[in-house]
């Protein structure tokens, strides 16, 4: 039976949250009323999609209380976990919810509806397909060709992006560089090391190069993007609007790259240590350069 409403735990990272959008749209189109739980930035990111979004609190007790409160308010005892962690399954179980999710990390016994991990996940299955297959299991539907990620943005986000550009004196035509990449993958840095050389090359060709740092990234951006316009920080929706208005985006395999693809920006996605087949941006105008080799 297809649930009439679902509490949905989003992934913790920007790129993964964006890659759930085809699955969320699929569930919504099937008639499921969705209430989403995720990181604090998810509310701004998904504001134009009109799903209620709640920030997940720190601590198991607070998380259980939030699940119980939302279940009571929405009348939904059903939950869907896009996360693979033991902790999110435990939170849902302690809150008395009937949770569906992939049977990973020895958490099968915590789930009311454990879903086997697809065999293709161990081969060439993309993360967007992985999330969509979980939605298909909830809906009792077969697999499908998964459409590109499509993020809608509110007019406020576009207005904020225009204000940022105007404040920095940036014309309508500009290129965005996204040199950030969090952490390491299999002991190797995810960040491409030649953004400084690329910045100088673009500037020499007459391009206006801009970047939008996240919290704590400004000093590094100014160092690795010499001569670029480093804009003031803004929320993730305004960042999406900035990317959508660009002539070109060049990004590491990172959340901003996925954001660019989701708003249909022309994107060059740089890979060097992560698996292209699983994590490449799932968009219409994406060119992938490099590989994990």
Image: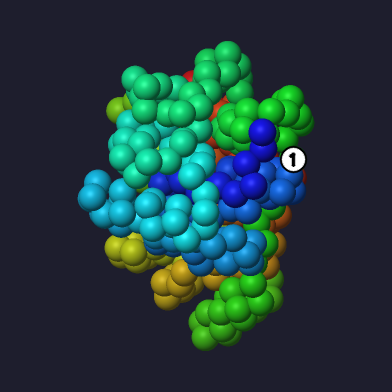
Q: Residue 142 placed where, x, y %?
A: 74, 25
Does 185 appear above or below 208? above
Q: Is residue 97 visible?
A: yes
Q: Position of residue 109 (x, y in %)?
A: 37, 22
Is residue 273 visible to us here?
no
Is residue 6 placed above or below 232 in the rendered structure? above
Front one among 112 and 29: 112
Residue shown at the point (42%, 28%) measured from the top left:
111
Please name the colour scheme applied to the rendered image: rainbow
Q: Tag 1: Cα neighbours inside 10 Å, few (<14), some, or many (≥20)?
A: some
Along the line of sight, the residue nearer the viewer: 209 or 165 = 165
Taking 258 as reference, is 109 above or below it? above
Q: Quadrant of residue 166?
A: bottom right
Q: Residue at x 48, y 24 (%)?
A: 114
Say if 233 sits above or below 110 in the image.
below
Q: Give left or right: position of 247 versus 82.
A: right
| Count of numbered circles on the image | 1
Q: Position of residue 282 (x, y in %)?
A: 65, 41
114 horizontally vs 125: left or right: left
**Which of 32 and 165 lies nearest the eye of the viewer?**
32
Which residue corresponds to mark 1?
Answer: 147
Q: Quadrant of residue 20?
A: top right
Where's residue 135, x and y in %?
A: 62, 35
Quadrant into which the N terminus falls: top right
Q: Residue at x 34, y 44 (%)?
A: 95
Regarding mark 1 in the picture, which secondary structure is present there?
Answer: loop
Q: Quick one: 253 or 26, which is closer to the camera?
A: 26
């Amino acid at each position: 039976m297809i649930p009439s409403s679902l509490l949905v735990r989003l992934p913790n990272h920007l790129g993964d949250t964006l890659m759930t959008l085809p699955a969320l749209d699929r569930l919504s189109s099937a008639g499921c009323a969705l209430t989403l739980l995720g990181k604090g930035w998810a509310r701004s990111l998904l504001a134009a999609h009109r799903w209620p979004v709640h920030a997940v609190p720190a601590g198991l007790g607070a998380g259980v209380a939030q699940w119980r409160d939302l279940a009571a308010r929405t009348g939904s005892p059903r939950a869907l976990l896009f996360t693979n962690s033991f902790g999110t399954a435990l939170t849902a179980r302690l809150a008395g919810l009937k949770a569906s999710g992939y049977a990973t990390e020895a958490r099968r016994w915590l789930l009311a509806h454990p879903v086997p991990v697809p065999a293709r996940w161990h081969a060439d299955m993309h993360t967007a397909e992985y999330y969509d297959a979980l939605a298909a299991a909830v809906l009792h539907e077969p697999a499908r060709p998964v459409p590109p990620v499509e993020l809608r943005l509110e007019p406020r986000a576009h207005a904020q992006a225009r204000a940022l550009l105007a404040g920095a004196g940036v014309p309508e035509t500009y290129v965005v560089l996204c040199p950030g990449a969090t952490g390491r993958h299999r002991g190797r840095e995810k960040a491409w090391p030649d953004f400084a050389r690329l910045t100088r090359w673009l500037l020499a060709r007459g391009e206006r190069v801009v970047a939008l740092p996240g919290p704590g990234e400004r000093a590094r951006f100014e160092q690795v993007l010499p001569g670029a316009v480093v804009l003031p920080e803004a929320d993730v929706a305004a960042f999406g609007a900035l990317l959508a208005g660009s002539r070109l985006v060049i990004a590491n395999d990172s959340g901003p790259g996925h954001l660019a693809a989701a708003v249909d920006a022309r994107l060059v996605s740089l890979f060097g240590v992560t698996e292209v087949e699983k994590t490449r941006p799932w968009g219409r105008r994406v060119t992938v350069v490099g590989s994990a080799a």
